[in-house]
Image (cartoon, rainbow, N blue to C red):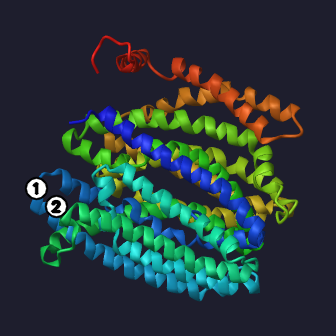
């Protein structure tokens, strides 16, 4: 059996390949859409279809919601139990598919109430139709593709995510260059149809491959068990509650931005949120799939294994997320200006507003990368019921705080109000209250949740002057200068982290493992 370290290395490596591919796609897509069909069209896509948009709320919550029950049955070694659990999961997926369809119908019906230009109402309706059909099918097939993380086949699962994410850019490129579409209304309508079709094709491909590789995944309704359905629904419901609550922060912020500032506000927030979220994605390379590991460890070693996992995962997530957050906070203005600010369709005041929003939310998103890891580990260990309602309440309350700030703040600062409500509420709920619940579940002290984060935070701040000095001194930035500045930061941060964050025994083990793999080593691997 492969060692835990080797399993973790494979998972993390495939996650980072996926995440860097997604970042590259994001770097290309946003300026392309803005240049092709305009800033308002980009804002509409952000409102309804991106990871921060309203339409994404329903389809994203299936990613991990079935992993706990399917993973427990799969690792139990009982073939009949796995078959019952797997097929009973389809009862849940069908139910949730129906609920999803109803929610998208409601969203379609209220499109006219959103702050969308009249000429973009019809494209907005087509975006909702296309994303709604895809989301319903995605929900229905969730038991099949959930088996990839259950089996810890993260390379294949991540490849699907990259292909699915690339469908947005592929559909835009086809319409822009093959069909020469330039009118925003016509192009958006066509994109809604083509994009959803490509997403469906990618989904059917990965589901077909899973079934061909394991014929046990062919649905067998006769094996459905009512007791198992109730058990799955309980876990699925609690995890969906927690996921929806966490997702509501960005979704409701996007909605407030639309109601107060229209699709212009959505575009500005999407630029800031996407740039800031890349710091969270860096840590998600460590966290993605960790709930599957937690399920396995909670079965093999219920107490010590999970506590050990949460300590090391927290430290590793902070090690990659915190320097990214410091870099994003300091370099936001030159980066955003080069990324989208120079596009002819970008309004002059959009980048200064986006920079301000980045600096409001980026530290929160870096913190979220750690708290999301805590949530996934506790979910995998079976503690989801302890905090799901807290997450939902936090997500809803963030919109209340944002709306209150919209009313109270002066006119020139109102556009920052939803982001402030998001950040303030999230930090209180997830970084201050949630750890108190977590330590009770794991029987550890509160400081054991925070201590792994301290040294990565200190090293990130110690290296900050390397970024601050160029920002103060350089007026005309280029991509080459930006890359060199970031490289200098990384060159200093890496050895400091090696000596300050990594423990001596870990350095010794890691160095020994490298030496064993060198071609001139006399030791066998």
Quarter occupied by residue 330: top right
Whether 409 is drawn above or below 76: the answer is below
The residue furthest front is 178
Mark 2 is surrounded, within 10 Å at the Cα level, by few (under 14), some (14 to 19) or many (20 or more) other residues, namely: many
Mark 1 lies on residue: 78
Quarter occupied by residue 436: top left
Residue 17 at x, y percent in the picture = 49, 45
Helix, strand or loop status at disc 2: helix
Q: Residue at x 33, y 61 (%)?
A: 146
- Say if residue 383 shows up in the picture: yes
Helix, strand or loop status at disc 1: loop
Whether 510 is drawn above or below 392: the answer is above
Residue 49 at x, y percent in the picture = 58, 71
Mark 2 lies on residue: 82
Tags 1 and 2 in contact by the CB under 8 Å rule? yes
Whether 303 is drawn above or below 205: the answer is above
Q: Residue at x 37, y 59 (%)?
A: 64
Left or right of 428 in this view: 181? right
């Amino acid at each position: 059996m492969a060692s835990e370290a080797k399993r973790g290395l494979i998972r993390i490596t495939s996650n980072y390949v996926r995440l860097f591919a997604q970042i590259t796609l994001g770097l290309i897509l946003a300026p392309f859409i803005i240049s092709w069909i305009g800033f308002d069209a980009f804002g509409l896509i952000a409102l309804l279809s991106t990871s921060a948009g309203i339409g994404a709320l329903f389809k994203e919550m299936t990613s991990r919601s079935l992993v706990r029950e399917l993973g427990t049955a799969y690792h139990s070694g009982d073939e009949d139990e796995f078959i019952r659990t797997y097929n009973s999961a389809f009862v849940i997926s069908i139910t949730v598919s129906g609920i999803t369809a109803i929610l998208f119908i409601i969203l379609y019906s209220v499109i006219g109430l959103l702050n969308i230009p009249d000429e973009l109402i019809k494209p907005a309706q087509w975006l909702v139709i296309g994303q709604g059909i895809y989301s319903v099918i995605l929900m229905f097939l969730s038991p099949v593709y959930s088996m990839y993380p259950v089996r810890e086949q993260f390379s294949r699962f991540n490849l699907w995510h990259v292909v699915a994410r690339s469908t947005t850019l592929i559909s835009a490129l086809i319409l822009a260059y093959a069909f020469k579409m330039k009118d925003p209304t016509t192009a958006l309508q066509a994109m809604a149809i083509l994009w959803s079709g490509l997403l469906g094709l990618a989904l059917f491909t990965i589901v077909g491959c899973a079934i061909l590789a394991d014929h046990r995944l062919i649905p067998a309704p006769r094996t459905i068990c009512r007791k198992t359905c109730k058990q799955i629904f309980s876990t699925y419901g609690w995890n969906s509650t927690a996921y929806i609550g966490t997702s509501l922060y960005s979704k409701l912020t996007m909605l407030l931005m639309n109601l107060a500032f229209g699709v212009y506000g959505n575009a500005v927030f999407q630029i800031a949120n996407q740039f800031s979220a890349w710091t969270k994605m860096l840590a998600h390379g460590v966290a993605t799939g960790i709930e599957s590991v937690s399920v396995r460890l909670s079965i093999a070693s219920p107490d010590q294994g999970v506590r050990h996992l949460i300590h090391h995962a927290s430290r590793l997530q902070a090690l990659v997320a915190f320097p990214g957050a410091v870099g994003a906070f300091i370099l936001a203005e030159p980066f955003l200006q080069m990324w989208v600010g120079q596009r002819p369709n970008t309004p002059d005041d959009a980048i200064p507003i986006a920079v301000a929003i980045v600096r409001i939310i980026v530290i929160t998103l870096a913190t979220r990368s750690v708290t999301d890891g805590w949530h996934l580990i506790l979910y995998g260990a079976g503690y989801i019921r302890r905090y799901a309602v807290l997450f939902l309440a936090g997500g809803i309350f963030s919109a209340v705080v944002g709306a209150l700030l919209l009313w109270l703040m002066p006119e020139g600062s109102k556009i920052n109000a939803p982001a402030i409500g998001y950040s303030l509420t999230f930090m209180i709920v997830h970084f201050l209250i949630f750890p108190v619940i977590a330590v009770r579940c794991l029987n550890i002290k509160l400081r054991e949740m925070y201590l792994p984060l301290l040294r990565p935070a200190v090293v990130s701040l110690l290296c900050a002057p390397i970024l601050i000095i160029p920002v103060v001194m350089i007026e005309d930035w280029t991509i080459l200068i930006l890359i060199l500045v970031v490289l200098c930061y990384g060159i200093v941060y890496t050895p400091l982290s090696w000596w300050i964050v990594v423990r001596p025994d870990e350095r010794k083990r890691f160095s020994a493992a490298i030496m064993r793999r060198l071609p001139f080593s006399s030791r066998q691997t």
